[in-house]
Amino acid sequence: MGRYDWLFYRFPKEETHMGGMLPPVQAYFRGENSVPGSQVCLPYRAYLQPGVIDDEPHYHRDEEYLAFVGHDLRDAFESFDAEIVFYMGESLDDMEKIVITKPTMIKVPGLFWHGPLEITRLGKPLFFQPVLFNSRYYAIRRRFDKEGRPYMDTVCHGVSPCRLDGTKTCSFCGRCREGKEALRWDATIT
């Protein structure tokens, strides 16, 4: 290497904490945190067990792409053996349930609500790659105050506090979900 070292990112092994859904380590490219000035976030995820990837709907201001293929990249079609349930819509109150059973790429336009996302059946390992065109991964979710009034809340990688250790920032490691039963948000969608 040499004078262009600043354009290269060597993946460190990052621990995952998703209760066996993922291998114990993965590779993540975290935009600005990986290469200063980058405007894209893209983790490389291999799923080994079915389960909930994201348990509640959210949106981003930016476009996002979600790729689902079989993990054996020598033949991403024959190695695809999964069923994925995904919700998406222009508004939170009008989400469509989408069932994925073949290799698929989904374009999620900016400001489109999406999620939950769940692998309901997994016969072979699955490669899932979300690609967000922003310098940091973030999710905007609807919350309600004590009087029941809605407001928007944002969780941002490297900015929002960690739910388990307020002295650290969120890395979306999954540790705060470890050992907990995932929410079944889809039961509220008609």
Image: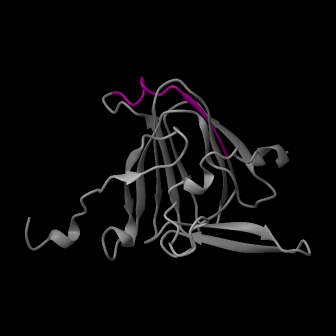
Nearest to the observer: residue 136 or residue 63: 136
The quadrant in which residue 181 appears is top right
Q: Looking at the image, can residue 82 be seen?
A: yes
Residue drawn at point x = 30 percent, y = 56 percent: 12
Instruction: Pick the quarter of the image with the C terminus.
Output: top right
Q: Is residue 34 magenta?
A: no
Residue 61: percent from left, percent from top: 58, 71
- Where does the magenta region start and end? 75-86
Q: Is residue 6 left or right of residue 37?
A: left
Nearest to the observer: residue 22 or residue 168: 168
Residue 105: percent from left, percent from top: 50, 44
Instruction: Pick the quarter of the image with the N terminus.
Output: bottom left
Q: Is residue 33 left or right of residue 3?
A: right
Residue 77: percent from left, percent from top: 42, 27
Seen in the picture, residue 123 relative to 152 is either above or below; the reply is above
Residue 85: percent from left, percent from top: 65, 39
Seen in the picture, residue 49 relative to 137 is either above or below; the reply is above
